Image (cartoon, grey):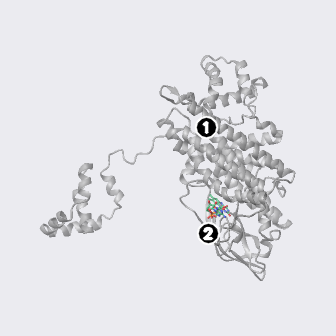
């Protein structure tokens, strides 16, 4: 009967949708009467059916209109009212002038990273995110920023302040969270583990090329059966002559499909403690395969790693990682960096939504400048000074700055979303509810930045406990979730398009809410610190 159903489809296919609907599903009686009346024809049709084993999709397409399968309109044509995030909007979230809290070096680094991200990553990120592919060609440009290795001193590493390192992650995440995760895993997890737990020889051997991003690292702790409960991991390391045999499985490991150096955590079968090993790519028995179908951080190549009797020579066991306590030292520092990712993501989303507000004071003089070849230096000096968080200072500083500022302003003009988009005869920005959402987002960002910054200062003076950094990461990612949701709402339908950033940012935040300790686990870490009672395991069964 199934075969007859297929046959009837071939016979009755019609260009009329109404016809087709009824003829896709003919009744059993009509099929059997048809079969009994025309046996030889049926034989021929069965042959046709076997031959036309084209996927059903193809068969549907035959009946579709001529514009079926045309490429999508470019978003700039489909919705010219707004500029996509490929031309990234200027940063406008530093309402409380956090920039004043940074040293000149930190400010300069921030602008260098921002410029690179806006120029190199923003134009390509949507395409790579959509394809879930990694843009290898930008790695040298990220390497040239001199940020990989973060706070590590020596061995070719930049030796940044913790604050400088933190703001680089925010700046990268502001444009693209996948990119910041790529560097975070490489630098704040893998390189930091080698720096904290490695011998001098290992540091000299691995860190210099990792610092330049000439080689890439990943960091494998999580296993299919042990996520939040990572300290119970089951991958084993067994001592053999001249080295160790690693056996087990890892999951979710960022960069693992192309990493040159894999830092792998395994349980020492002699001591039952967690140790760390450097496994090199292509080691016999090692396999890393990409996890497909992620809805967030799609550019990051997360992998499943299988280790089947992988031999690691003694020289590649990290001597300083003797137990999970040592792993925790790495996690505490990296968690602080992770906390800055949601800050950056929220800043980017706010910039995308907010840029309209600047138009009112700046773009008008610029328009007159453009139209009449006349420029009101007085007005622009005043307004540009409003962005002193950036390199765009004042026009009085000379022609070079004037040019720079004009470029900035012309870019600004392209981002007018809420001001230009009119509904019910008024710009979206004129509605009180819209303004309330923007202010809520802005308030969140100020508080997030100040908590992140304070954690950096606590780190500097040795007072950043695991409870404090866990509270910071948990609270910041919670507020960021609220912020990106508001941003997504503000852009309406375009809020679900990756082209306008907020949809991508919205999705990218989800894994960050979960990795480096989920919101719940970080809350429990802080809870344990402030009460002295650990609540990770369920309470003993009640007698009731
Ligand atoms: C995109 C991405 C990248 C990652 N990159 C890496 C990487 O590079 N290297 C690496 O080693 N790992 C990586 N991870 C793994 C990440 O650290 C884990 O996903 C995370 O620790 C959570 O583990 P899980 O996914 O197994 O969730 P589970 O531990 O199964 O948790 C599921 C839910 O249960 C809750 N839960 C668990 N235990 C408790 C409890 N005691 N009390 C209350 N609630 C609880 C959690 O909060 C969560 O809501 C990555 C994950 C993602 C999604």
Q: Is residue 463 above or below residue 384?
A: below
Q: Position of residue 33 (x, y in %)?
A: 14, 66
Residue density around tag 2, few if under 14, some if 14–19, many if 20 or more, within 10 Å: some
Residue 184 in sight in this render: yes
Ligand 1 lies in quarter: bottom right
Q: Position of residue 104 (x, y in %)?
A: 83, 38
Residue 341 in sight in this render: no
Quarter placement of the C terminus: bottom right
**SS class, disc 1:** helix
**SS class, disc 2:** loop
Q: Which residue occupies the foreground of this view, 277 or 454?
A: 454
Residue 58: name its quadrant: bottom left
Q: Which residue occupies the foreground of this view, 463 or 18?
A: 463
Is disc 1's CB within 8 Å of ligand 1? no
Q: Residue furthest bottom?
A: 241
Is disc 2's CB within 8 Å of ligand 1? no
Q: Specify whether 459 is left or right of 128.
A: right
Q: Residue at x 60, y 47 (%)?
A: 505
Q: Position of residue 230 (x, y in %)?
A: 69, 67
Quarter placement of the N terminus: bottom left
**Residue identifier under label 1:** 352
Q: Residue at x 69, y 41 (%)?
A: 445
Q: Residue at x 54, y 53 (%)?
A: 131
**How far, Cα to Cα, is label 2 from label 1?**
37 Å
Residue 302: name its quadrant: bottom right
Q: Which residue occupies the foreground of this view, 165 or 121?
A: 165
**Residue identifier under label 2:** 224
Q: Specify whether 435 is left or right of 101.
A: left
Q: Is residue 334 above or below residue 383?
A: below
């Amino acid at each position: 009967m199934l075969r007859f159903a297929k046959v009837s489809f071939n016979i009755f296919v019609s260009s009329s949708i109404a016809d087709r609907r009824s003829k896709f599903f003919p009744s059993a009686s009509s099929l059997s009467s048809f079969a009994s009346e025309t046996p030889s024809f049926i034989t021929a049709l069965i042959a046709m059916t076997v031959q036309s084993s084209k996927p059903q999709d193809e068969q549907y397409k035959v009946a579709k209109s001529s514009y079926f399968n045309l490429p999508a309109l470019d978003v700039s044509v489909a919705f010219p009212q707004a500029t996509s995030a490929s031309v990234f909007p200027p940063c406008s979230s530093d309402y409380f002038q956090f920039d004043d809290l940074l040293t000149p070096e930190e400010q300069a680094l921030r602008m260098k990273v921002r410029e690179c991200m806006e120029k190199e990553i923003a134009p390509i990120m949507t395409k790579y995110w959509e394809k879930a592919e990694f843009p290898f060609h930008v790695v040298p440009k990220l390497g040239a920023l001199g940020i990989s290795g973060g706070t590590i001193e020596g061995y070719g590493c930049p030796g940044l302040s913790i604050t400088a390192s933190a703001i680089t992650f925010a700046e990268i995440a502001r444009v693209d969270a996948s990119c910041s995760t790529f560097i975070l895993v490489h630098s704040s997890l893998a390189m930091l583990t080698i720096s904290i737990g490695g011998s001098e020889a290992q540091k000299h051997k691995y860190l210099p090329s990792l610092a330049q991003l000439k080689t890439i690292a990943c960091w494998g702790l999580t296993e299919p059966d042990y996520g939040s409960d990572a300290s119970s991991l089951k991958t084993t390391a067994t001592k053999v002559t001249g080295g160790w045999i690693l056996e087990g499985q890892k999951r979710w490991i960022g960069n693992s499909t192309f990493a040159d150096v894999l830092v792998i955590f395994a349980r020492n079968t002699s001591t039952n403690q967690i140790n760390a090993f450097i496994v090199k790519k292509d080691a016999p028995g090692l396999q890393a395969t990409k996890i497909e179908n992620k809805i967030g951080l799609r550019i990051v190549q997360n992998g499943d790693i299988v280790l089947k009797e992988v031999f690691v020579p003694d020289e590649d066991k990290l001597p300083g990682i003797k137990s999970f306590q040592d792993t925790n030292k790495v996690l505490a520092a990296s968690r602080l960096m992770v906390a800055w990712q949601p800050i950056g993501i929220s800043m980017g989303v706010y910039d995308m939504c907010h840029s309209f507000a600047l138009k009112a004071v700046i773009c008008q003089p610029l328009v007159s400048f453009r139209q009449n070849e006349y420029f009101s230096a007085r007005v622009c000096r005043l307004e540009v000074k409003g962005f002193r968080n950036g390199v765009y200072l004042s026009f009085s500083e000379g022609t070079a700055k004037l040019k720079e500022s004009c470029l900035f302003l012309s870019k600004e003009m392209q981002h007018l979303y809420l001001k230009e988009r009119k509904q019910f005869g008024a710009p979206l920005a004129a509605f009180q509810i819209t303004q309330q959402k923007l202010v809520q987002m802005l308030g969140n960002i100020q508080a997030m930045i100040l908590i992140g910054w304070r954690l950096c200062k606590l780190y500097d003076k040795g007072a950043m406990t695991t409870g404090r950094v866990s509270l910071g990461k948990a609270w910041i990612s919670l507020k960021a979730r609220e912020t990106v949701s508001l941003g997504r709402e503000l852009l309406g339908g375009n809020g679900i398009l990756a082209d306008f950033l907020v949809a991508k940012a919205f999705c990218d935040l989800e894994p960050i809410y979960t990795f480096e300790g989920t919101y719940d686990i970080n809350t429990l870490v802080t809870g344990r610190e402030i009460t002295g009672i650990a609540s990770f395991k369920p309470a003993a069964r009640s007698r009731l």
